[in-house]
Image (cartoon, helix red, strand yellow):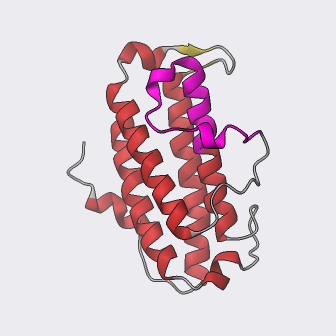
């Protein structure tokens, strides 16, 4: 199930970044009625929380993380931090994150997924599931912004393009 979530997440990311790269810069930074104030704020929040997941996973098992997160070790709690400055940088980092998450999920055993993370009192499976739900929530925020801009793209329709992925 987690592997399907990774594939779905990756497909949605590709659609979102296809839209973002065509938007004028002022639309990316224009103030919106969202928790993270603009499109960049939402993207930064998603990336920030993914990097927090990597820091958590690295603390459990350093061999799980395939991309270097050292450049982001300065990140602390606080959910409005700027991690990426532009769409190209965000897209590249998100691709790296997606590839790393895919490799991690593909390599995890059932035993590892059931492993309890003491600092959170949750299993690794529960944490990973939460990450995917969190991403979907904020991608819905982006979809709402896209709708308000009149962008005709059925991001939710991504599921149909993955119907053969089990």
Total marks placed: 0
Residue 30 lies, in percent from the top left, at 72, 80
- Give the residue drawn at x 33%, y 42%: 4
Q: Quadrant of the N terminus?
A: top left
Residue 66 is covered by the magenta coloring: yes
The residue positioned 52% from the left and 38% from the top of the image is 68
Q: Nearer the viewer, residue 110 or 25?
A: 25
Left or right, 113 with respect to 159, comes to: right
Work out which quarter of the rendered image holds the C terminus and state it: top left
**Main structural element of the magenta stretch: helix, strand or loop?**
helix
Residue that sits furthest to the left in the current view:
164
Is 33 located above or below residue 71 in the figure? below
Residue 129 in view: yes
Q: Is residue 18 above or below residue 68?
A: below
Compared with 103, 117 (above or below) is: above
Magenta region, residue range? 50-76
Residue 140 in the image: x percent, y percent? 57, 62
Q: Is residue 57 magenta?
A: yes
Residue 1 in sight from this viewpoint:
no
In the image, taking residue 29 as reference, residue 64 lies left or right, namely: left
- Considering depth in this image, is 39 or 165 the residue closer to the camera? 39
82 sits left or right of 130 in the view: right
Name the residue located 48 percent from the left edge and 26 percent from the top edge. Answer: 125
Q: Position of residue 124 (x, y in %)?
A: 52, 23
Q: Residue at x 56, y 79 (%)?
A: 147
Where, by quadrant of the figure, is residue 57 drawn? top right
Q: Which residue, as the protein is rendered here, is positioned at the far right?
A: 78
Residue 153 relative to residue 82: left or right: left
């Amino acid at each position: 199930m987690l592997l399907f979530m990774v594939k779905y997440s990756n497909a949605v990311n590709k659609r979102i970044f296809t839209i973002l790269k065509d938007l004028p810069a002022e639309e990316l930074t224009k103030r919106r009625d969202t928790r993270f104030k603009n499109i960049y704020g939402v993207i930064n929040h998603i990336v920030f929380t993914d990097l927090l997941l990597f820091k958590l996973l690295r603390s459990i098992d350093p061999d799980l993380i395939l991309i270097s997160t050292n450049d982001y070790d300065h990140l602390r709690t606080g959910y409005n931090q700027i991690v990426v400055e532009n769409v190209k940088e965000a897209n590249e980092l998100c691709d790296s994150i997606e590839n790393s998450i895919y490799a991690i999920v593909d390599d995890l055993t059932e035993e590892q997924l059931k492993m309890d993370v003491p600092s959170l009192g949750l299993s690794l499976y529960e944490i990973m599931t939460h990450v995917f739900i969190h991403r979907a929530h904020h991608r819905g925020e982006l979809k709402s912004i896209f709708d308000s801009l009149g962008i005709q793209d059925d991001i939710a329709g991504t599921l149909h393009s993955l119907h053969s992925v089990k």
